[in-house]
Amino acid sequence: MRVTPWEVEGIVDYEKLTREFGIQPFKDIPNELKDNKLFRRGIIFGHRDYTKILDAIREGRNWAVMSGFMPSGPPHFGHKMTMEEIIWHQKMKGMAFICIADIEAYVVRGLSFDKSKELGLQYIKNMIALGLKEDAYIYYQSACKDVKDLAIKLSNEVNWSELKAIYGFTPETTLSKMFVTVIQAADILQPQLEKFGGPKPTVIPVGADQDPHIRLTRDIAARISIFSFESIRNGLRIRSRKGKKYLDKIEKKLEFEFKRYEEHIDVFGKAEKIEDYIRKLELEFGGPAFILPSSTYHRFIMGLTGGKMSSSKPESVISLLENPSDAERKIMKAITGGRGSAEEQRKLGGLPERCSIFELYKIHLVDNDKTLNEIKNDCKSGKMLCGYCKKMAAEIVKEFLKEHQNKVLEAEKLLKDYTIISNSF
Ligand code: SF4
């Protein structure tokens, strides 16, 4: 198994990944998340600090959702999953930020900025067709001065050894590939800039391969901010990363009971209120007061030819722009969890957990859990054979594509209602 932001090889062991990366598994799904089938069905299997988002949702405080797309090919069903995660969080009242990662596409895939602009527009229109609301903030990295300026500031906090440890970079790694890591960190932290209302919990829905970016960004966000917080009994311990002078400064302004020590201040009261208050002071002192970003991790959608669905293997993907009859052809040829013969399958049943078609049902095609369970049971008992099952999936996909592609045409006319930071339009 090899999982990096730019390469996924082998069979992904999610338990191992969770352990090695220190991702927190979603154990008991809170009620707020249960109407989302991706959470409910364990497709989103883990997170970092998602409780911050749940708290913000419950308390009606500001928070954001941010994710991006590297436009290496037309948007497909794998991207649709991330798009729907962003849209769902936007419906839950998160401010939505969407990045078209054209700098990354240029550096990592050698894609020209013009091609990225063209492909990126497809991603935007498809998101609008899937339900993205007008208050989303959409931008191309190359056109976003805020992101580029922030990346330069953040780069001051990162050295080569850290990048090597996180990404496994070698002496041959180019400077541009290293710099892209801080561009990504700036993408993630941009929602917390003053321009967007300042520090706020921000969730980044991503595939597990993107976790190195999250880890790096959380480290940088902590390092570049002035104050750090530790829970203590009845309050918070505040330390300054930028020298004791900032502890002296807050000491003069604190409106809570506190005790000053040489290297820290213990402040007593409701932790959340103290933290909000100290962050406001940090902003007054010119610090960014970043809240460490949260993240959710989804499993990779299985491709129709096995392995991960990837634009680099056209037969493995169903593009959202695909001709419905081509989609049908690919589905009818897909790898399934079926047995060698119809007779064997009737006797032993199929293996839905190893089937690319069942994966489509589970992630995209069937919202109702009862219906999904019926498909699973009919497969496992041998009552349903793969030919029929594929045909049924193909019909749903064709219907979806026809309807969706009409909505994409409509989305073209709606683009003017959206904020899109781009060099081209
Ligand atoms: Fe997959 Fe359907 Fe065949 Fe079961 S019957 S293995 S779910 S295609």
Image (cartoon, grey):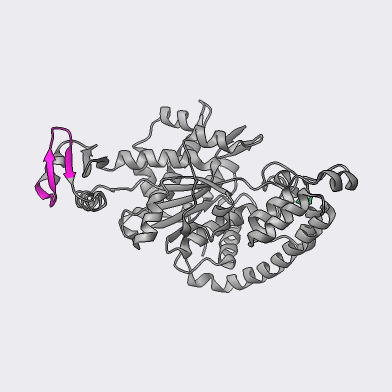
Q: Using the image as rendered, state which of residue 66 and residue 81 is in the foreground.
A: 81
Residue 334, image x, y percentages: 78, 49
Extreme residue in the top direction: 171
Residue at 52% across, 48% down = 206
258 drawn magenta: yes
Q: Quadrant of the rendered structure where residue 157 is?
A: top left
In this rendering, the count of numbered labels is 0
Residue at 24% across, 42% down = 227
107 drawn magenta: no
Residue 207, image x, y percentages: 55, 45
309 relative position to 144: left or right: right
Q: Using the image as rendered, state which of residue 121 and residue 58 is in the foreground.
A: 58
Residue 386, image x, y percentages: 82, 52
Q: Say if residue 397 shows up in the picture.
A: yes
Segment tinted magenta in the rendering: 252-267
Residue at 71% across, 68% down = 402
Residue 405, image x, y percentages: 67, 67
Q: Say if residue 319 shows up in the picture.
A: no
Above or below: residue 345 compared with residue 422: above
The N terminus lies in quadrant: top right
Above or below: residue 52 compared with residue 392: above
Residue at 64% across, 52% down = 73
